[in-house]
Amino acid sequence: MAGRTHGQQALPITLGYKVAVWLAELLRHRDRLAQVKKRVLVGQFAGAVGTLAGLDESDLDALQVQSSLMAELGLDVPIIAWHTSRDSIAELIHLLCMIAALLGRIAKEVIELQKQEFAELEEPFEAGKVGSSTMPQKRNPMLCESVLTLARLCREKSATAVDTLIINEHERDWSSVQMEWAIVPEVFIYAHGALEITRRVLAALRVNTERMLGNMALTGGLLLSERVMFALSERYGRQRAHDLVYTCAMASYEGDRPFADVLLAHQDVSAVLSREQLEALLDPRQYTGLAGRFVDRVLDSLG
């Protein structure tokens, strides 16, 4: 399929490569989720301002009481009070928002590639699914739109989490704590919902390989201009080859002519490359680089 940069066709890639990029990011989030536990699952029991003064004057060992309570709750013991240090909670919220953002990006990509103008991917569809009450032909990406909605709802919670780090006065300030009571449950619900819907989408994602191949041909070979440039650079050097291919590419685009024809009409190109050689260079299936190997590397990292 066509890889795209700045919204335009750039170079060939594989769908597996695109999905592996998503997977690699998701695996990093999985690692982060495991790492954040030791900072989030820490209890708090230290008295009004965090000094354990009330127990310190009793016959009880204050630190032992604290430690025993944390053991009872299955939480780690803090090295000092964190009444106004909400960084661990904020880190967790940010992480959930990042996970939801990835899922939103995946959903957005499916939405874009489901448009009739692309028609390369489509979220699961079954007979009876209605896209519109007035337009019977519609096959709307309703699942992906839900994921994108949930991801966008998460985003504002991340900003609120940062606010709890800034406005947290003196040794205790419940105005920030009460904000967490609102945003933490919401972020968990939104992120979980986005994850579950994304699983449904990817489990039955429709892939139109013929349309992918057809879309790569839309530019008449321009997708492989880089490969042609590299071939010509052996004769003319990198900069001269770039200028030459650029001139031909713009002529092909503006004149709506096949790239190969424009190239061969240029004497500096035809002096180096035959039509057969040029057509081989313009085969997108032969220029996906190490896409397959990168996919394997991501899969190997699953363990």
Image (tube, helix red, strand yellow):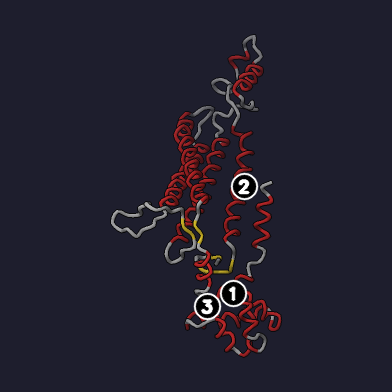
| Residue 110 visible in the snapshot | yes
Q: Which residue is mark 1?
A: 224
Label 1 close to label 2 by CB (< 8 Å): no
303 up-or-down from 70: above or below? below
Q: Which residue is mark 3?
A: 220
Q: x%, y% of residue 164?
A: 50, 36
Separation (CA) of disc 2 from disc 3: 38 Å
Q: Which residue is mark 2?
A: 27
Who's the residue at 39% across and 53% down the image? 127
Separation (CA) of disc 1 from disc 2: 32 Å
Callout 1: SS: helix
Q: Quadrant of residue 186?
A: top left
Separation (CA) of disc 3 from disc 1: 10 Å
User: In the rendered structure, which disc, 2 or 3, sits on the residue that comes first in sequence?
Assistant: 2
Q: x%, y% of residue 72?
A: 61, 20
Callout 2: SS: helix
55 up-or-down from 215: above or below? above
Three-letter amino acid code at disc 3?
Answer: Gly
Relative to the observer, which residue lies in front, 90 or 137? 137
Who's the residue at 53% across and 69% down the image? 213
| Residue 247 visible in the snapshot | no
Q: Residues within 10 Å of mark 3 (few under 14, many from 20)?
A: some
Three-letter amino acid code at disc 2?
Answer: Leu
Callout 3: SS: loop
